[in-house]
Image (cartoon, rainbow, N blue to C red):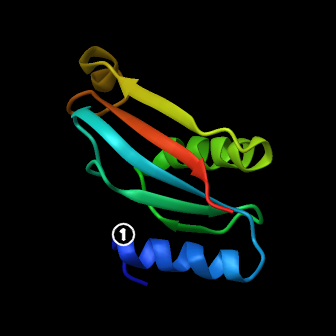
Amino acid sequence: MSDTSEDILATAAGWVAQGETVALATVVQTWGSSPRPAGSRLAISASGRLAGSVSGGCIEGAVADAAQQTMASGTPQVLSFGVSDEMAWEVGLACGGKVKVFVEKLA
């Protein structure tokens, strides 16, 4: 499946049509190094299905966990992740960066 925003939204709508509870995570801001640009989306179903990407690695898992909380409570969240340039070198990255992700319940 393609990773376009329209495809991700169509997938999320399909899950909703199947009776799933769904959350949508959207990258709303980035600074420095970020694997995905602002506007990137990840749809998450209550059963654990994922479509799209907001970053990768441990951030994706943390966003999926937060999405489960948002689906349960109905309360949107803004998540912030980042690593300093100094810390980036320690973990083998070329430079640091930050990303903010908005998580909302769709249905």
Does residue 60 sit above or below 75 in this rendering?
A: below
Which residue in the protein does label 1 denote? 5
Does residue 70 sit above or below 81 in this rendering?
A: below
Quadrant of res 41:
bottom left
Q: Residues within 10 Å of mark 1 (few under 14, many from 20)?
A: some
**57 or 76: nearer the viewer:** 76
Q: Residue at x 26, y 50 (%)?
A: 37
Amino acid marked by disc 1:
Ser
Q: Could you say where residue 26 lies in the image, as x and y percent from the top left?
A: 43, 50
Q: Could you say where residue 94 lies in the image, as x and y percent from the top left?
A: 20, 33
Question: In this rendering, would 6 be left or right of 96?
Answer: right
Q: Could you say where residue 2 lies in the image, as x and y percent from the top left?
A: 37, 81
**66 or 57: nearer the viewer:** 66
Q: Which image quarter holds the N terminus?
A: bottom left
Q: Residue at x 27, y 42 (%)?
A: 34
Q: Could you say where residue 100 lies in the image, as x and y percent from the top left?
A: 40, 35
Q: Residue at x 60, y 39 (%)?
A: 76
Quadrant of res 20:
bottom right
Does residue 74 sit above or below 30 in this rendering?
A: below
Q: Residue at x 68, y 74 (%)?
A: 16
Q: Which image quarter holds the C terminus?
A: bottom right
> Is residue 3 at all visible to an observer of this figure?
no
